[in-house]
Image (spheres, rainbow, N blue to C red):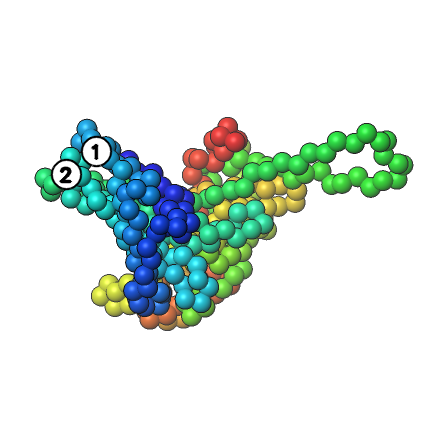
Amino acid sequence: MGTGVFALFARTVFLNTATIIQYYGDEEISGVPLARFDFRVSHVWSGYRIIANGASATVGIAGSFWMDPASLELVRMEVRADEMPAALGLERAVTDIDYARMRIGDSDVLLPQDAKMVLTLFTGEVHRNDIAFSHCHEYSAESSIRFDVPEAGVPVSAPPATRVDLPAGLMVSIALETAIDSTAAHVGDILRGHVTDDVRGKGKAIVIPKGASVTGRIRGLERAHSPGPVFNLTIELTELEWENTNAAFYAELLLKGAARGEGTPGPHAPPIPGTGILRMTGAQFHVPAGFRMSWRTLEPNQSLKRSR
């Protein structure tokens, strides 16, 4: 087990006056030019505790972080355990964290997207823990107290939107209204679309009406070679709205249409639940507005109300 992925490591590195940071140079990650910095924090100040093989110890941390040279926003951090006592039985303990902006309520917030923790024992045994954050939501409430009597004719505010939970297994056809081009797209970009057909439940009643608006974002944009140039475009759709109703959208991508341009989308299994990946072959790609996708809602929608 490891803690610190969500905020503790970043807090230790950037807010600790005992942290030693040194500029390393420029590097490319997935084809994106970034600025790399190396850091080190002594075990005296790190607060990083590891429990393994019946022993525990507070260890130092060392590693690197990569920043966008234009926005100065954090993109990736690699944290390596340092000054580990032999009693832990660990040769290495490394955590990699990727960051991007997420839309939470009315704000864009820089948050971890995923993390990988790898522990290598002296015996050669390797343990790996993968963590992914998706479909984050803001929950809030407003209240007011009045001691006066409202005057006649005071306008009454519209009733709040109704929040509904979607059952699993709904087949939802969605058309994008936002074009995606590899020359301008960035992780975190907002995506908008709409439902192209009425979605009916088991009793044939309409659960999601045609025209319901859909919002989401670009969750990942990775360039690879397999053997030619390939883009893996990860899409995360999170919200549905229609009339005075909204619903969280948690689904898997099924069928994909054809995008025009040099890139051609193909199937690819999504590694993160609630997202879909378009595998685009070519040195660049363009997904036009109107691009259609088929999604199937997943089980967690049924428990959203109970978990709040």
For marks 2 and 1, give the CA distance: 11 Å
Above-or-below relation of 253 to 301: below
Circles 2 and 1 in contact, beta carbons < 8 Å: no
Label 2 crowding class (10 Å Cα cut-off): few <14, some 14-19, many 20+? few
Residue labelled with disc 2: 86
Q: Is residue 39 visible?
A: yes
Q: Position of residue 81 (x, y in %)?
A: 24, 45
Q: Position of residue 38 (x, y in %)?
A: 30, 58
Q: Residue furthest left?
A: 123
Q: Residue at x 42, y 49 (%)?
A: 15
Q: Which residue occupies the foreground of this view, 44 or 23?
A: 44
Q: Which residue is mark 1?
A: 52
- Label 1 environment density (alpha carbons within 10 Å; few <14, some 14–19, many ≥20): some
Query: Which secondary structure lies at badge 1?
Result: strand
Front residue of this view, candidates 25 and 193: 25
Q: Amino acid at mark 1?
A: Ala
The answer to whether residue 255 shows anywhere in this view is no
Which-is-in-front pick, marks 2 and 1? 2
Q: Amino acid at mark 2?
A: Ala
Q: Residue at x 53, y 56 (%)?
A: 192
Q: Point out residue 67 in the picture as x, y percentages from the top left corner.
A: 38, 61
Pick whichever, 51 or 224, lies toward us.
51
Above or below: residue 288 compared with residue 166: below
